[in-house]
Image: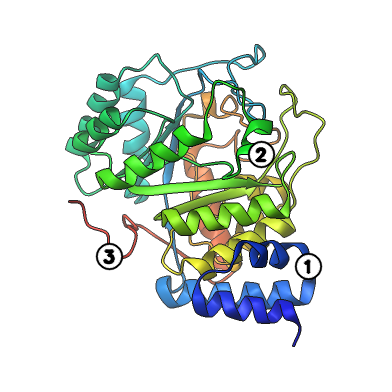
Amino acid sequence: MGQLRELIDKLHQNRELTLSEYAELIKYRNAEDAEYLRSLAQDEAKQTFGNQIYVRGLIEFSNYCRNDCYYCGIRRSNGAAERYRLSEEDILDCCRTGYGFGFRTFVLQSGEDMGYSDEDICRILRRIRDEFPDCAITLSVGEKSRETYEKFYQAGAERYLLRHETASEDHYRILHPKELSLNNRKRCLTDLKDIGFQVGAGFMVGSPGQTEEHLAADFQYLRELEPHMIGIGPFIHHKDTPFRVEPDGTLELTLYCLSILRLMFPKVLLPATTALGTIHPLGRELGVQAGANVIMPSLSPKSVRGKYLLYDGKICTGEEAAECHACLENRMKRIGYQIVTDRGDYPGWTRE
């Protein structure tokens, strides 16, 4: 048995490694040990969740953003982006459609759009909560003050997704303009968890400038944060960003990282992302077999799906929500998994 196998077994047993051990696990990976890691991760996920895959209805309600992150297709300086905002009623209609499919979690995602006030968001949350009291509401609208996050929580949001993107200051500076701060990003995640949200963090795999040491720092930061959800996916370039000629992240390393995360966090909610499905035709299926247990089909109206483009080549932009849902259900069945229609909370979580 090689040293890498020993590290994988140590991770499986202890749920964590040292910074240098994480880096070694990534740097010296090989196909045989990756398969061993993957099989352990799939078994871990099945022990907690069986063959059940939680589904989240994603509503991308605005692609306006005040930020100018170098990797993102909806960055504010992208003049080629066709901007849109959904109305309150549009958002409720998306929820009604999803509810009809059996979805019991709605994910409201946007850029950091200052066109919606805190009260606007709170009013939308209250309306969803009133009409769908048995559903979970997830928000993903970026960096806000603690006071704003508390308002969102009181209005009915229970989950909040905010990828940290990278836990390393030097790497953060490669990816973001100077007005944005890694410390503030981490402050947001700490506040969200303290308030009582189920919190989601995460990072891109293979983003420009990323090293094994950066990924190791991401794993170590996540161990400290102990989030309820972790969203990772391959970096995919967008033609209208400064990173337009950068190479994309790989399916192989993304799946490897998913399996590491499943061994670290047996109960975590771990999506097989749309970016995985974009980089490979069976990407989401492979993600599930690597330890993921969540998929997030779009409920956004067909008229705007092709406009929320964080990266090039995004799949399912031309489909109706019903087509997308039916397709995913069949794909999961083919690999022995079943989409379940419940809230899919983090095991043991209760709203305070």
Q: Which residue is drawn at 65% across and 49% down?
A: 277
Label 1, label 3: how far apart the Cα atoms are: 36 Å
Query: Measured along the vertical axis of the image, is residue 222 above or below residue 94?
Result: below
Q: Earlier in the sequence, mark 1 or mark 3?
A: 1
Taking depth in this image into account, of 169 and 74 the one nearest to the observer is 169
Pointers 3 and 2 in contact (C-beta within 8 Å): no
Q: Which mark identifies residue 171? A: 2
Label 3, label 2: how far apart the Cα atoms are: 35 Å
Which quarter of the picture shows residue 340?
A: bottom left
Taking depth in this image into account, of 219 and 285 the one nearest to the observer is 219
Secondary structure state at the residue bearing disc 2: helix
Residue receiving disc 3: 348
Q: Residue at x 58, y 79 (%)?
A: 10
- Left or right of residue 123: residue 217: right
The picture places residue 245, in percent across and down from the top left corner, at 82, 31
The picture places residue 232, in percent across and down from the top left corner, at 57, 50
Taking depth in this image into account, of 217 and 79 the one nearest to the observer is 217
Residue receiving disc 1: 28
Picture colour scheme:
rainbow
Amino acid of disc 1: Tyr
Instruction: Determine if residue 271 is in view.
Output: no
Label 2, label 1: how far apart the Cα atoms are: 22 Å
Query: Measured along the vertical axis of the image, is residue 1 above or below residue 85?
Result: below
Q: Which of marks 2 and 1 is nearer the N terminus?
A: 1
Q: Which mark identifies residue 125? A: none
Secondary structure state at the residue bearing disc 3: loop
